[in-house]
Image: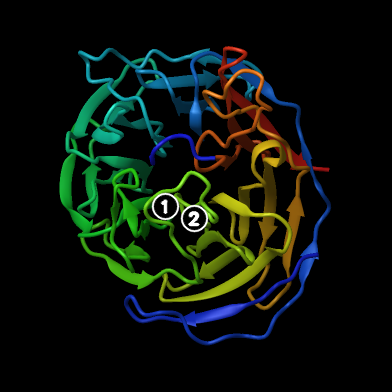
Amino acid sequence: MRIQNKHCLLLVVCAFALTSCDRPREYVPALPITSAPALKLSEPVDQLDELAREPMLVQHPDGTIFVAGYGANVPCLWRSGDGGATWTRVQVGTEAEGAIGNSDVDLAVSPSGTLYFVVMTFDRAKEEGIGIAVGASRDVGATWTWTQLSNDRYDDRPWVKVGPDGAAHAIWNDGSGVSYAVSRDDGATWQEQPRIHPQGGSSHLAIATTGEIAVRISPISASAHMQHEGVDLIAVSTDGGASWEKHAAPGERTWTFPYVENDPMPRWVEPLAWDASGALYYLWTNPAGLWLAQSTDRGATWMTWQIAQGGELRYFPYLTARRPGELAASWFTGRGVDLQVQVAKVDIVQRDFPLRLAQAPPFAPDSWERRQPPGEPRRRDTAGEYAAIAFLRDGRLAIVTPIQDDQAKRGGFSFRTIAAQ
């Protein structure tokens, strides 16, 4: 989390030959993008309840969909047993039982069905993180076991993911590097590990179906209170987190520090994803456009596609992957009255074949700047730093965005699905 109140296709292919933390080099001639038929976006299902900023979603092996978001003074989780048509609030426990948190969230589920819910606590008066807690449920959210992973000043941006062996991995940052903990007993206990890196922020976490772990380490951390200039890395572990190989992230980007409300190039979460073949992907934006990189050697070298260029600002991307070369992405464009959420599906048949890109119609999120004076023209707000997207078991995509409307006293989230035409 950072401090609140944020406000023609061309393909360029770059193969990056990297050594540990070196800048990329080597360029490959451009290839065309093939436009696939447009995707169909459903009407939203609006769940009105507590505010759910920066919501995350995950689907349980039994088909239940869970959504978490923040904005209340307690951890908030919802479930749907009918594919997202209706939603009910999940009782995740009491403060005495360890269910503590009011900020950044993440969800994950193990192959056997253990559900994980990690949440940050943020002191809004001091604008500092002060804790990270993680809950685990072995009965589809009916009962929970909570563990306090950290109570350190500047605790920030937790993530949790589960490997194919059932081990759960959690990361976060506190201005002194990327912290890391593992549970190998379905969340009953957690063991803190050596820091993944002594500097930087926990920008994202992804685990492959083959067990490799990837962590995006960014230069800004501690809710935008700290910067470690030049720390712009992707760390990969092939031994369950015991050791890490680190490489510079492909591409060019700038980071604004200290934080400014009208950041010319907003960035925070820099998403990673693994597909079923073990290829690693990274999605980012810069003033030139939207970029997707693929590595088939665990981050040592990369091929990069520019999948959009020109037009208005693109920022706060999110990425997920499923079958080999099958990805889905979301990002924001515009600001204020022009703010929209973009959704695309990407298919990479072969690295030397044209990439296929299909987009859904963009939509305006039902989230508005907070504390605007009455009578002032209203401005939309992202209400977070990504729009989470996931593949569902029935083949559709799902995306969840916040409902943040203080003037109308409305809070919650909107759930949409995306399918082929």
Q: Is residue 74 above or below residue 279?
A: above
Q: Does residue 59 appear to the left or right of 230 in the view shown?
A: right
* SS for callout 2: strand
- Asked if residue 251 can be seen in this view, the reply is yes
Query: Neighbour class for label 2 at 10 Å: few (<14), some, many (≥20)?
Result: many
- Find residue 302 and report its horizontal and vertical position in percent: 50, 75
Q: Is residue 327 above or below residue 32?
A: above
**x then y, percent, for residue 398:** 63, 36
Q: Amino acid at mark 2?
A: Ala
The disc placed on residue 206 is: 1
Q: Position of residue 349 (x, y in %)?
A: 68, 67
Identity of the residue drawn at 50% across and 37% down:
384
Q: Secondary structure at mark 1?
A: strand
Asked if 128 appears above or below 344 in the picture, the reply is above
Mark 1 neighbour class, 10 Å CA radius: few under 14, some 14 to 19, many 20 or more: many
The amino acid sitting under disc 1 is Ala
Asked whether 63 or 86 is in front, the reply is: 86
Total tally of numbered discs in the picture: 2
Residue pictured at 46% horizontal, 64% vertical:
254
Q: Where does residue 209 sit, x and y in percent of width and height?
A: 44, 53
Please tell me which residue is depicted at 43% across the width and 35% down the height of the picture: 4
Compare residues 272 and 251 and report the one nearer the observer. Answer: 251
Mark 1 or mark 2: which comes first in sequence?
A: 1
For label 2, the residue is: 273
**Quadrant hosting residue 314:** bottom right
Q: Does residue 60 appear anywhere in the picture?
A: no
Residues at marks 1 and 2 touching, judged by CB atoms closer than 8 Å: yes
Alpha carbon separation for disc pair 1 and 2: 6 Å
The structure's colour scheme is rainbow
Quarter of the image where one finds residue 103: top left
Q: Depth check: 160 or 5 in front? A: 5
In the picture, the quarter occupied by the C terminus is top right
